[in-house]
Image (cartoon, helix red, strand yellow):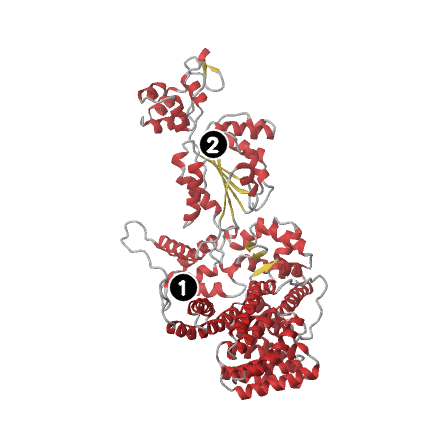
Amino acid sequence: MRTLRLERGWSLSRLSEMVHYSKGYLSRVENGTRVPSLELARLCDDTMGTDGELAQLLTTTGPPEAPGGARGADGAEGSGAPAPPARPVPAQLPAVGRMWGRHGELARVEAFLARQRGPAVIALDGIGGVGKTTFAVSLARGLSASYPGGALFADLQAHGPAGPRTVPGDVAAGLLRTLGPTAGASVDPAERTALLRSALAERRVIVLLDDADSVAQVAPLLPAAGNSLFLVTSRRRMTALSVLHGALRLSLDPLPTDEAVLLLRRELGRRAAPAAGTGQAPAEPPTGSEDPDEVLAVIARRCAYLPLALQIAAERMAAQGPSSAPALAAELGRAGTRLDALALPGEAGTAVRSVFALSYRRLPVEQARALRLLALHPGSVAGVGATAALLGDAPGTAARLLGELHAAHLVAEVAPGRYRMHDLLREYARERVEAEETAAARTAAVTRTLAWYLHTAEAAGDQLLGEGRHRLPVDPPPERCEPLRFASTADALEWYESERVNLLACARAARAAGSPVAWQLPYTQWAFLFLRHHHVDQLNAGLVARRAAEEDPDAGPLAEACAEVVLAGARAGLREHQAADGHYRRALELFADAGDRVGEGGALLGYAMSCVRQGRTAEAAGHVDRAMELFTATGSTWGSACALAGIGEAHLVRGNPDAALAPLSLALELHRAHGSLWMQASTWTLTGTAHRERGDHANAEDCYRRALELHGRTGMRAGTAHALHQLGVCLAAQGAIPRARRAWLTAWTLYDDLGDPRAQDLRVRLTALPPCRPA
């Protein structure tokens, strides 16, 4: 080795850097005081380009004789006896399927290894069936040329079908036997792990520790020296490996849609390939009346993009023929059958249900209960508060349990404090909740959850519309249900947005359960949906509410009236004004039948605004006056404030700005008392328009800016756009063209983003403005 090194003009330090062995170790090898390993010989051959010369010398003559006549590491006397046969290079990686995609993860590994010095640790975690072992084995194979010492494998059996988890001392004993003759198996477990670390420090190998349960199971095996690579897979997040051992931690998610479809296509092609020499072309992926890629995309989605599920689906299609794809897609789409479909006859160990069962059985009792009850949540994403109601626990306990399930990759945190369960795992959890929870327990959990959403939505509605708004008679929250309260309108709107999909899912679940929440919840949130332009959601919620009201013999006319109001607002937002009018008229009849005068007045105001949008101003004024009579008779100052604002707007539409100021001023005073920032802001915009129409532009500007300040505090984009729109009209009337253009451009952007048809009016106005003069 010294001769070859000096021929190349290399220092011992340079060789040390290139082969990743210490300079002192190499010096002892060259001086004959340290027995070289076959691994080192091969690595030096590769580095110096000597075509296996050193390795051949070592394997044909045995290790060189050490000073004093000793041979080999055990100090046996060298008397010319034949050298023992060289041990084969370890190649223990198991056979696994092919890996598809994961290009981003591979790039992170490459970048990590490029800057790593010393032993490297890569921790791979993810839900069962996501392909952790496949990724690790594929990665190890790709890196094998850089680790000539071979590859070691140990199954740590955190989720083995039977028996205890493997302990570090036993793992060390097995790996030591692979590395060479040793007394490691007979010593104390702690000594075994220390001996293993010593042995690995002198080698450059890949060690795959598969299916780890915890960092404590892995950490004793990791050396502090050497240049080996350790790949650790686990269904739990091994965060401490990153913190304490500098590991690169990769969480493997289900595949993206395009990679999942590609996996299906390639697996089908590979399985359908003919035997060599047949000359037959492989069968095409499934075809038929439907686009084959669309069918595969449906199958991929219903497999929830989980690699194990995709592989099973591909195997089933290959076995049954390409034309079976549409039938498989339909089978995977039927509720409660997907886990049955994602299994192969006689191969229970690879079925998706079996993989999930191994994770579930390892959970502590409290976590297992939380996982199965989460399957009862009506939506796809659950926050801490809703989970607490579902479990009947305190929010702190719910947060802890969600965090523990997240660490075990049984839920994913999609936003701070908000968690989602994998679709297939959710189906498994639903099986478990049906099997392990009584019907009464399931009903109580759903009841608490629906009540939590209803009462939290009521609290958000109070922030949006103000105290004193029209409220429905609802049952109080049940025990162990703590609805949220909100400190500001912005907080309430943020909650509404984050829960918007869940709120519709809750209404549907309530209808299925025969709960009045099915019509109460849509009515509670109609203002939010209308003001945020979620008109399609509002329409769907209204349809659920109306069907629930029709199906419940005890609901009465109030339930139907509330449903009609929700539908009317949705149709008005969609500019279907005639349909909206029909819903308003029906709501008026039903509120009258129910004896709810405040509800009737609210419906009259909505009907009046619909009339204004259609140019029926006289009719609108009549509806507003009638609403004012109803609110005054019932003592509803909140309703009176809304009616006063409506009276002011009716005067503006009819060209009477002077008459509009008094009712608008009184409406502002009442809205301040009720606390609705949105109502105040809207009234300030109307007041600004009244001043503008009177020619008082200074007061108009001040009113518009007050409206903008309040809308800014609430995050109400539609109101902001309207106030800017009207401010631009005011500025243009004064000849302040650059300022008007800026206001209209911002308003146009907001309108366009909301899909508001007023964006077109502003486009026309902006086009008509004179061009800006250069400065």
In the image, is 138 to the left or to the right of 510?
A: left
Determine the residue positioned at 32% across, 53% down: 274
- The residues tagged by marks 2 and 1 sit, at their Cα atoms, a distance apart of 48 Å
Secondary structure beneath dot 1 equals: helix
The kind of residue tagged 2 is Gly
The residue under label 2 is 118
Q: Position of residue 209 (x, y in %)?
A: 51, 39
Residue at horizontal 54 percent and vertical 53 percent from the top: 354
Looking at the picture, how far across and down is residue 775, in whole percent?
A: 37, 62
Is any atom of residue 596 visible in this view?
Answer: no
Q: Which residue is mark 1?
A: 295
- The answer to which of 147 and 715 lies nearer the viewer is 715
Is 630 situated left or right of 335 in this image? right
**Image quarter hosting the N terminus:** top left
**Label placed on residue 393:** none
Residue 395 in the figure: left or right of residue 540: right
- Tell me the mark number nearer the camera, choosing from 2 and 1: 2
- Seen in the picture, residue 279 relative to 25 is either above or below; the reply is below
Residue type at the position of mark 1: Val
